Image (cartoon, grey):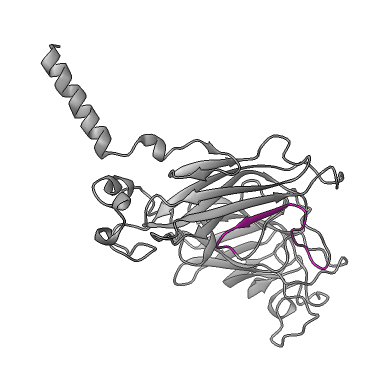
Amino acid sequence: MNFPVAFALIVLVIGMLQQTPALAQYTGPSLACGGTSLVKSTNLVAPMNVATNGINCVYTIRALNLRICQLRLDFNSFSLAQPTLDPYPRCVNDVLSIENLDFDLCGENTDQHVYVPFNPTNAARTLTITFRIASRNQIPTLTNPHWSVRVQQLECPTGMAAASGPSLRDTAPEIAAPIPLARTFHGDFGLVAPVGCLQYFTEPTGTVESFNFGAGAGPYLGGLSYAICFQRKSNPLRLRATNFEMAASADPTVGNPGFDELCYSSIQVPARSEDHLHIPNAVVQVPGAPTVRASRFCHHSLLDANVEVSFPGPFMLFFNSDRLFDPFRREVGFRMTYQL
């Protein structure tokens, strides 16, 4: 290859690099405490000896562009101190707080995930994720915490209004064409969750469980109310509960082991439990029992049950836990396999 041709190729490559964002922008490194990420995907990693004296570990996620509408957080590893039980299970010693979510997480949540709404604007393009860890020197009975959390920035599909509203021609210079056009062509359409969903399952089979289910010891956190969504296929949604133990508002009977009014009274009573899993239009088959049609489930009512759900619209379940706790009514949670 002669010199003029080689020089021309070098100029061409440099020009392409100037027009296209570096690949590292989308597959960036792990993010340390106090760091700010401007990448498509990053990992939040716990520092060494994080629990000795305790720490507030703040990660900042900066939106790639104004099309970003959600973050998906996958807890590849997540073990914090267990929730306290007084007056109800809640995070006190170790706490994960995520901006734009109205509740905290703690306990055992490896392999869980959450979706976080993100609405960046030219004036405010960041979102913070904070781990507040208690000192083990002061509370030596707490287990050592660890976490590794993958954070993905998800863009609204092309043609939809960006999360922040303005069109491309109204955006700041760093968002303007041609470079940001390369940033907006990600295959996020199948990953973006329906509005209002805290969790979104797209694989044809898998497992869904309550937060802090762990190895089946629980307890689930109190004061939660969120939607669990599944990508709609042509088949019904089928569930099988391998573990199911939630509080009930009254003692179960042979006729009602934990359905509907036993879980959620039509008349609100302050001291009456309202913990339940809401599965609209569920058809339940428990071995050795008649088929049941119900919508709200608590106590052991779904243990080893086969559940089929078929109704118009997206498949959505709703988990609700109150701010009551009775040590004589175990609040472990649920684990279910699903098939779409």
Q: Main secondary structure of the magenta part?
A: loop
Where residue 82 appears, x then y in whole percent?
Answer: 78, 53
With 313 as the anchor, is 186 left or right in this view?
left
Q: Residue at x 66, y 67 (%)?
A: 224
Q: Residue at x 29, y 45 (%)?
A: 182
Residue range in magenta is: 87-101
Comparing 221 with 315, the one in front is 221
Q: Residue at x 77, y 75 (%)?
A: 273
97 falls in the magenta region = yes
Quick check: 320 above or below 168?
Answer: below
| Residue 291 seen in this snapshot | yes
Instruction: Spot the residue most to the bottom.
Output: 267
Comparing 15 with 326, the one in front is 15
Q: Quadrant of residue 149?
A: top right
325 falls in the magenta region = no
With 56 as the anchor, is 62 left or right in this view?
left
Where residue 291 appears, x then y in whole percent?
Answer: 65, 71
- Image quarter hosting the N terminus: top left
Where residue 217 appears, x then y in whole percent?
Answer: 79, 53
